Amino acid sequence: DFGVDYRRAVYFMLSLGYNPLDCSKDYIKEVINGGGFAVGVGKGGGIVGWFNFDSLGCLTFSNDIYGNGNVDVFGPYQVPYSASSCDPDMWADTADNIIA
């Protein structure tokens, strides 16, 4: 028995380029918690369920670090680079600076 590793997570919506995102915060919350992303028999779904299933129950996330009953999703934030520039390090650095 390795125990369970509990992690806390927040999620940032980033739009690469100058086009607005075509999904809502509610959609992101649904994907994180299980809507339309089923994983394993009886293991629930969503990204959280996938990590829990794939780690054989040894990894789980708290998506509500503020304790207000909501998945913590922030944004959308605009990262002003074209996807054709293909420089993920530059995108990440820019996103870090925008979010900070």
Image: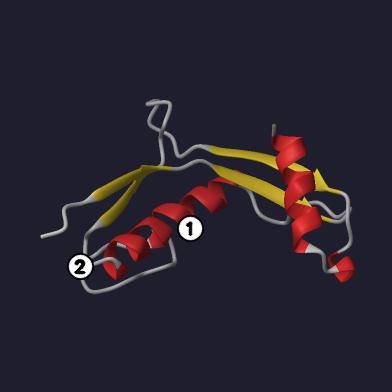
Q: State the residue in front, 62 or 33.
A: 62
Q: Quadrant of the C terminus?
A: top right
Query: Which residue is located at x 33 percent, y 71 percent?
Result: 39
On screen, 6 above or below 35?
A: above
Q: Are marks 2 and 1 in contact (CB under 8 Å)?
A: no
Residue type for callout 2: Gly
Q: Which mark is residue 31?
A: 1
**Crowd around label 1: few <14 · some 14–19 · many ≥20 (10 Å):** some
Query: Measured from the top left, where is residue 76 in percent x and y?
Result: 71, 43
Secondary structure beneath dot 1 equals: helix
Left or right, 32 with respect to 82, comes to: left
Q: Which mark is residue 43?
A: none
Left or right, 53 with respect to 82, comes to: left
Query: Measured from the top left, where is residue 64 in percent x and y?
Result: 40, 35
Residue type for callout 1: Val
Secondary structure beneath dot 2 equals: loop
Q: Which mark is residue 42?
A: 2
